[in-house]
Amino acid sequence: MITRLSAQDICNRLQMLGDRERALALQRYFKTAQGEYGEGDLFVGLRVPEIRKLTKEYQTLPFEEVSQLLQSSLHEARLLALFILVRAYTQGDDSLQEQIFNIYLQNTRFINNWDLVDASAEYIVGSHLRYRSRSPLYTLAVSNLLWDRRISIVATFLYIKCGELAETLRIAELLLRDREDLIHKAVGWMLREIGKRDRLTEEEFLHVHYKTMPRTMLRYAIEKFPEKLRQQYLRGERVRLFGK
């Protein structure tokens, strides 16, 4: 009789493969102390390349078990589940992709740290909505859940890579007054990515918002600008648009 591997079996293995000292370092890095954004998250101490290697080994894990893995208290188990889902999504047909998309949206409360979002949002949410209605992005953008809002903006990275910039700018406007630093960083990051491809479009957005947008968001957005221009933005001075 063949015994089906369970999510718990995998979690047990992750714990055996882990490194306690690295786990403690990761818990500090990912802000897991009381009152921090990753409060209570547990790490076993595995590196991302090690987790990616396990993805190939568990790529045929049934989605029922992948969902259980995604709901694990172990951070690396949740990251492994997301890598499995991303891999399955890229290789699946329309029906399978729809199933994975739904699993993802039903479990966003477990995609609860920035690395989990950044490793998956564009590849599942962004990809799934590219040729469909993007209304789910706007539902995520106004959610009370921090991770939903980060998913909404990071998912648009795919569109930026494809030269589609408008969606990112619309989501960014919705998040301009967000109170969370992790959102400020994500929006600034996406604006910077727009600027790498179309400096004028980024600066047109900044020209409207740079005096009132969160400082961290602005710093991330202008990180690659010439130093003199960066300082003008940071001082709130009148800035001449790129190429004009």
Image: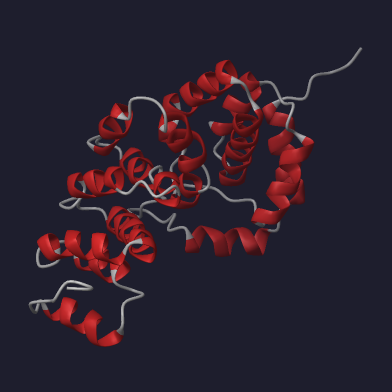
Left or right placement of residue 146 versus residue 14 in this view: left
Q: Residue at x 42, y 50 (%)?
A: 38
For residue 207, what is the image quadrant?
A: bottom left
Q: Nearer the viewer, residue 82 or 18?
A: 82
Residue 141's place in the image compared with 177, above or below, is above
Left or right placement of residue 226 versus residue 51 in this view: left
Q: What residue occupies the far bottom of the structure in this picture? A: 228
Residue 78's place in the image compared with 113, above or below, is above
Q: Position of residue 225 (x, y in %)?
A: 31, 77
For residue 133, what is the image quadrant?
A: top left
Q: Position of residue 198 (x, y in %)?
A: 33, 62
Is residue 46 something that shows in the picture? Answer: no
Q: Residue at x 15, y 61 (%)?
A: 213
Q: Residue at x 65, y 23 (%)?
A: 65
Q: Nearer the viewer, residue 165 or 60?
A: 165
Q: What residue occupies the far left of the structure in this picture? A: 238
Looking at the rendered structure, the number of numbered marks drawn on it comes to 0
Residue 102's place in the image compared with 223, above or below, is above
Q: Position of residue 87 (x, y in %)?
A: 65, 36
Q: Quadrant of the C terminus?
A: bottom left
